[in-house]
Image (cartoon, helix red, strand yellow):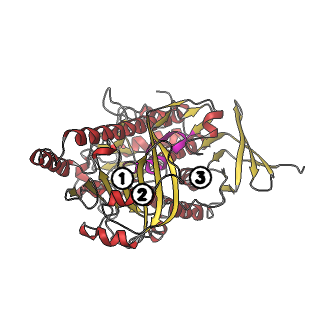
Amino acid sequence: MSEPRRIRAPVVIVGGGPVGLALAVALGKAGIRCVLVERQAGPSAIPKGQNLTARSMEHFYYWDCAAKLRAARLLPPGFPIGGITAYESLAGGYWYAPAGREAVAEFYYQRNERLPQYLTEAVLRERLRGLDSVTALFGWSAADVSQDNDGVRVTARQDPGGARCEIEGDYLAGCDGAHSMVREQAGIGSSGADFDQRMVLAVFRSGELHARLQRFPLRTTYRVLHPELGGYWWFFGRVDASETWFFHAPVRKDATAGNLDVHALIERAAGFGVTCAFEHVGFWDLRIDIADSYRSGRVFIAGDAAHSHPPYGAHGLNTGLEDAVNLAWKLAAVLDGWGGPQLLDSYSRERRPVFAGTGEVITEGIADDAAFLARYRPHSDRGEFERAWSGRRSGETAPPWYEPHYEGSPIVWGPAGAASGVRGSHALAARAGHHLAPAVLSSGRNIFERLAGGFTLVALAGGEQPAAAFRAAAGALRVPLRVITDTFDGQRAAYGRRCILVRPDQYVAWTGNGPPADATALLRRAAGHAA
């Protein structure tokens, strides 16, 4: 047997789906050498994880590939991204088209996007090729991972062929999916809600379905609420503009591709006959799972390895991409020498409550749908049903209170007693622990065009004193800091604060109307050093 290949890099990433790829790109852009191990030579062709939020698109902007991602979309420019909700079937008389994520578009620098996950992965793989600091091992499987006080080790084997590679690093990131080997070998437990419900996923082509749905405003997804489903959905989603679809539905526990008539199920959900040419039929179990911690020593987990849930609300991929961004800047800061020991601990303390809250939102949504369907029936009391349906129609938008934030983080200055989570509010005001809203500067450029890879101090009509204090503190601590000075008017006045310290991930660490009492202590805490 030949000697194994040996590689040494500060960060080893196991799993090269979209989250692992995103982490590698973010680290590579920061100049951090890393090795990515992914068993699949190419992306899977199953069209999952299609909706990318405006926040996720901000990441692609900073990774210098937002334009390529938009160019890869299958839908034509301007195609509406949103959903239809119908009662009993898509042919029924009761339906509505709620507002989607466009309701909060002004709070982000990019607009949202929709394309199959395999195309997103293809764009990220291409971006990796332009980063010399990243070594990508596609077609290799991680066979074993371990850690001690000095570092981490991964044994990878090539598929096929069996060649071996021994990889050593300072830190390991497991982005290897819901059945994560990294999580298991790191001894990280998990728990969550099991709905004891089997689901089918079918991918099919049908131009006839597209033609029949022209009764609705043009949309990308169509969900059906039926009293027999107990709060679960029949769910159709477009892959392209006119022909290719995916379909999710609850099925009996023993359902297989051999004993389930998926075509008949699709026609029942549609409410009319429709020809289908199937490309894929698979099954999954509806459950919510979250790791007890996102860190164990030198090992971190992200994406589905840290949390998984049913594809309700398009949260899964977007949550995983935010994991990658949060972890990347903190690993880079520590490896570059300016991040303190509390910085890596804050990854789990910030990101885990976000998914815990997301899981609660999904569980509550299923229960609310079930309660509505059990309580209101047009066949028994049409007036009562229509009043309740009208209430859902007016109230069911992309909830403005779903706003992931880090108010309770130990490295930001949130309100006393605050907790991190997803229940907040979108606002133009700059608030510690929250995403910074975009604003146009006096120069005509957007502030997001000026935010740095390190910390950024936004000083609005505060004179030179705040900037001088922070510059001195950053120099002493070797913390990268850019200063943006401007006037406190126009869109910038909506920030409500004249001094705003922004983190590398565009979240606000601290705000004030003048220089802090001790800029050095403030910056030390924001960079993860002991208070």
Mark closer to the observer (3, 1) = 1
Query: At numbered mark 3, what does the secondary structure look like: helix, strand or loop?
Result: helix
Amino acid type at circle 3 is Ala
- The single residue placed furthest to the left in the displayed view is 383
Mark closer to the observer (2, 3) = 2
Q: CA distance from mark 2 to mark 1?
A: 7 Å
At horizontal 19% and vertical 48% (from top left) the residue drawn is: 392
Quadrant of residue 370 in the image? top left
Query: At numbered mark 2, what does the secondary structure look like: helix, strand or loop?
Result: strand
Q: Is residue 258 left or right of residue 487?
A: right
Q: Nearer the viewer, residue 130 or 272?
A: 272
Residues packed near mark 2 inside 10 Å, few (<14), some (14 to 19) or many (20 plus) = many
Residues packed near mark 3 inside 10 Å, few (<14), some (14 to 19) or many (20 plus) = many
At horizontal 39% and vertical 73% (from top left) the residue drawn is: 207
Q: Is residue 377 visible?
A: yes
* Part of the protein shown in magenta: 301-322
Q: Nearer the viewer, residue 190 or 436?
A: 190
Amino acid type at circle 1 is Trp
Name the spot of residue 388 as percent of width and height, x first.
15, 45
Amino acid type at circle 2 is Phe
The residue labelled by disc 1 is: 234
At horizontal 26% and vertical 62% (from top left) the residue drawn is: 91
The residue labelled by disc 2 is: 247
The mark nearer the N terminus, 3 or 1, is: 3
Is residue 303 within the magenta segment? yes
